[in-house]
Image: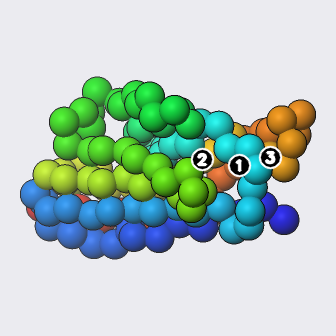
Amino acid sequence: QVQLVESGGGLVQAGGSLRLSCAASESIIYINAMGWFRQAPGKQRELVARITRGGRTIYADSVKDRFTISRDNAKNTVYLQMNSLKPEDTAVYYCNADLGMTIATIKAYWGQGTQVTVSS
């Protein structure tokens, strides 16, 4: 069964950095876009950043110039480098990927979420 396994969350002071990683749990043949979403208490889940297989990226305005998304296609892994963190970045971060064993079976998968807490 396909799983997206996240790591790298934690507690950091404002201005600090964290790096999140998300890897598919088994060899997946087809992986299209991968990305990160976040959900703060009492708020809706929102897109943070997304990257296509070819490396094209999009970012939420609130994280531009502070966060960088990247991926290693050979390792089926996506990363989120978060710099200059702010208390408002505090949320559960979820990995998301469109993947499947065949092109016809590609669908969206979600990780279990990892907590990021930024103290002021």
Residue at the spot of label 1: 109
Q: Is residue 32 left or right of residue 67?
A: right
Q: Determine the secondary structure under disc 2.
A: strand
- Where disc 3 sits, the SS reads strand
- Contact flag, marks 1 and 3 (Cβ < 8 Å): no
Whole-percent x, y for residue 53 in the image: 56, 36
Q: Closer to the camera, 79 or 66?
A: 79
Q: Position of residue 99 (x, y in %)?
A: 73, 44
What amino acid is at disc 3?
Gly
Mark 3 to mark 2: distance in Å? 13 Å
Front one among 97 and 28: 28
Q: Is 25 above or below relative to 71?
A: below
Residue 22, percent from left and from top = 53, 61
N-term mark: 1 or 3: 3
Query: Of the residues shown, which amino acid type is indicated by label 2?
Result: Asn
Residues at marks 2 and 1 touching, judged by CB atoms closer than 8 Å? yes
Quadrant (top left, top right, bottom left, bottom right) of the C terminus: bottom left
- Residue denoted by label 3: 100
